[in-house]
Image (spheres, helix red, strand yellow):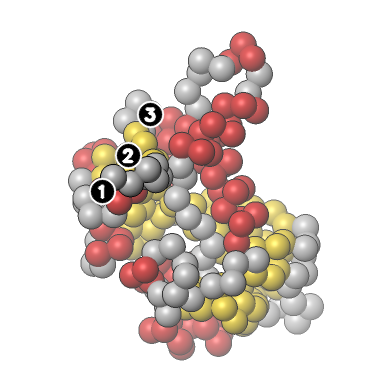
Amino acid sequence: MSLVVEEQILVVPTALFHDLGYFQGFSADVDRYLPRLLEGDQVEYRPRGEMEEDPSFKQLIPYMLFRWTDDDGTTHLFEYLRGSGQGERRLHTKRSVGIGGHISTLDAKVALSLRETDHLAERDDYTVYREGMRRELEEEVAIETPYTEKIAGLINDDDTPVGRVHLGVVHLCDVERPSIRPREADILDGQFRPVREILPRLGEFESWSEIAVRALFG
């Protein structure tokens, strides 16, 4: 018998997503989806292994894009190659412009510890989501430049096995300088490249990156 405790990750019922308004691809209507998905009473934490194969739930994933505009006005995105040690095996050897990952009960514990004592009983899944996003960034990349961040939209891709069990929240981060470096050994060839050079190569990228780049920069 294994003594390893399986990771419990944040999910929402796929039926809730459909009730709010099904879409395939990209939606910029953040206000329609995010409050209900993160502040409603249907957020759950379930075993990751089960959720990777159960399309009746959507794993909510922060997906952070880093944009830098040089002195000539040329827009660049941080892109990299996913190595074989990255968590989602179905995306290995794909290129990506997104940094992010699952929200777990570990993030919920940290968020709980940060609240004031008289608010400990409150449920605040948005705070948990933000803590998970902060952790993922800290684990995966070193950001050595000031930046601003905004939520640009959501991604749903039911055309792929990975996409059927995930729902992406796209965060667009504008950096002052192209000073981001990988912390994880399996984030390979990480660097800023002009969007005009990325667009013709989108066939090399995971579907979420292709969807996000086309929607925001295409």
Q: Nearer the viewer, residue 51 or 178?
A: 51
Nearest to the observer: residue 83 or residue 13: 83
Task: Tell me where residue 27 appears, x and y as whole percent.
Answer: 39, 55
Specify which label sits upstream in the sequence, 2 or 3: 3
Q: Earlier in the sequence, mark 1 or mark 3?
A: 3
Q: Which mark is residue 89?
A: none
User: Which label belongs to residue 46?
Assistant: 2
Q: Secondary structure at mark 3?
A: loop
Find numbered disc 2 in the image and state the secondary structure of the residue it sits on.
Answer: strand
User: Mark 2 touching mark 3, by CB under 8 A?
Assistant: no
Asked if the residue under mark 3 is in contact with the one under mark 1, i.e. CB atoms within 8 Å, the reply is: no
The label on residue 40 is 3
Query: Residue at (59%, 72%) from the top-left corner?
Result: 185
Seen in the image, is 198 located left or right of residue 47?
A: right
Does the residue at mark 2 contact the one at mark 1 (Cβ under 8 Å)? yes
The location of residue 218, given as percent across then percent down, is 47, 75
Query: Is residue 32 at all visible to an observer of this figure?
Result: no
Q: Amino acid at mark 2?
A: Arg
Circle 1 residue = 50
Q: Secondary structure at mark 1?
A: helix
Alpha-carbon span between mark 1 and mark 3:
22 Å
Q: Give how far across and how far down residue 47 sits, in percent.
A: 32, 43
Front-lying residue, 204 or 6: 6
